[in-house]
Image (cartoon, rainbow, N blue to C red):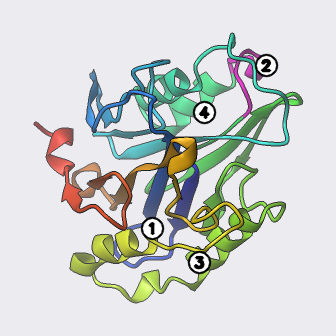
Amino acid sequence: MCTLLVWKNVHPEYPVVVATNRDEDERRPSTRPQLLSRDPRVVGGLDQQAGGTWLAISSLGYVVALTNRRGAGKHDPSKRSRGRLVTDLAARAGVTDALARLREIDAHEYNPFVLLALDSRSGFAAHGGERGLEIAPLSDGVHAVTNWDLDSQRDEKARRALELARAFPLATIGIGALAPALYELLQYHEDGPGGRDGGLCVHLPASHYGTRSSAIVLLGSSPAATRYYYGEGHPCEGALEDVTSLLTA
């Protein structure tokens, strides 16, 4: 995914709110959210080319998400799938267990990434690249990742994503209106030199590239309060579905 927005301890009912757009080659095969693990139950889309996923939600009440990372080393197609790292960590007993597992990996075996793992009480951000693995607790507040480091100011889109997330009135939006309002935020367009590529919703048909799907995850104070929403295709053209039942079916 290429836009990952996170609000931690900002909304009065949901300690963690995540809104994402996955930008990808339109020819790369992938699925809608499905069951990825049974014990614990983990759901997310499946990358059918390299395996794994970009976003996984556990029925135990936590979420793991990953973006590609620029400026931290060259891409090597022979390296291990970053998406499989997401599914591995999401199948752990919780964020603490996922952190322990992550510390065991050699980040040089993967192409550069930014990975976030959160539950309603804690979370961390991990940056993998040519300098190895760097892990830090995720602070309360508003965060954004595009394809640069967490809360990066290096790129216009990264700066704009963080500005939009900070300006979004999350704390004042009621439970019933929250997911639709976040989905509308993910529809944001800003014309760039290559067309509609400067916003959160990306359209680059000449390059067979753009926003393939959207997801919104709301983590409450207990695992049973988790809500998971999914939108297929460009959010400006699609519809948001409540797929929370996948966590309990």
> What residue does disc 3 label?
164
* x 47%, y 55%: residue: 21
Q: Are marks 2 and 4 in contact (CB under 8 Å)?
A: no
In this rendering, which labeled residue sits more in front, label 1 or label 2? 1
Q: Position of residue 25 (x, y in %)?
A: 52, 37
| In this picture, residue 202 sits left or right of residue 124 | left
Span of residues in magenta: 104-112
Q: Is residue 110 magenta?
A: yes
- Which amino acid, mark 3? Leu
* x 68%, y 51%: residue: 137
Q: Is residue 231 something one can see in this rendering?
A: yes
In this rendering, which labeled residue sits more in front, label 3 or label 4? 3
> What residue does disc 4 label?
99
Q: Is residue 150 magenta?
A: no
- Which amino acid, mark 4? Leu
> What residue does disc 2 label?
108
